[in-house]
Each structure stands twice: as C-alpha cells, then as structure tokens.
Image (tube, rainbow, N blue to C red):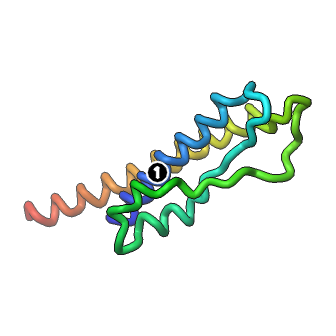
Amino acid sequence: MDLLGSALDASEKNHRVVSQNIANVNTPGYKTKRLEFERLLAQLQSPDAKGASDEPLPVKDLEGLAERMDGNNVNLEQEVAELKENALAFQAFSHLLASRVSTMRRAISG
C-alpha cells in the first residue's frame, strides 16, 4: 500500500510538470521538462522520505527535440498525450489502492 501511495504522489507531481510544459508552450526559450518518475518513486520510498517534500523534484530538460525560432521546444500534442497517459496511470493506481483498502476492510469485518 505504501508503494501505491507513493506512485499516486509521484503521478500527481508528474501532472504538475507536464502541466507546466503546456502552460509554457509560448514562452520563448522554455525547454520541455520531464519528471524522472523512477527516481522520485525511489526518493518517496526511501527510509528518510519525510524530508522528500523539501527536496526539489528530479526534473530534467528533454534533449533532441525540435526547437522553434524562439528557442522553445514544447510540442503541445506530445504534452497532451503525456498528460492523458499520466491520468490513466493515476486512475489505475487509485483503483488498485481502493481495491486493497476494500480487501482489508472485508478482512477486518469478517
């Protein structure tokens, strides 16, 4: 259950990063960013995870994307697809967590 909770948290943070990319689609010089999901999940699962909220998100600029004349490399269609994929992952994690909680409730109540 801890892993599913961490996965939900990481998915929420990923949503923020992708939303920021979409919000900056017309900002000159802005570079597309990606959350390093696995690294964040490892941070959230570490024994000292309570301080993880103070740490900056493990985000990297994506390299090799086509840039426009203003230096921006955000591809709106790609970001919307990324947002939809992340929403599906969040939904799957939340359904799995709800199922685990339901199973535990049934076990406790007999």
> In the image, what residue occupies the spot 51% across and 61% down?
40
Toward the bottom, the furthest residue is: 47
Which residue corresponds to mark 1?
Answer: 92
Specify the amino acid type for callout 1. Ala
SS category of the residue bearing label 1: helix
Q: Name the quadrant containing residue 73.
A: top right
Front residue of this view, candidates 45 and 83? 45
36 over 83 or under it: above or below: below
Number of numbered discs overlaid on the protein picture: 1
Front residue of this view, candidates 108 and 41? 41
Image position of 39 (left or right of 29): left
Front residue of this view, candidates 16 and 98? 16
> In the image, what residue occupies the spot 87% across and 38% down?
67
Toward the left, the furthest residue is: 109
The N terminus appears in which quarter of the rendering? bottom left
- Counting from the top left corner in percent of width and height, residue 52 is at 41, 60
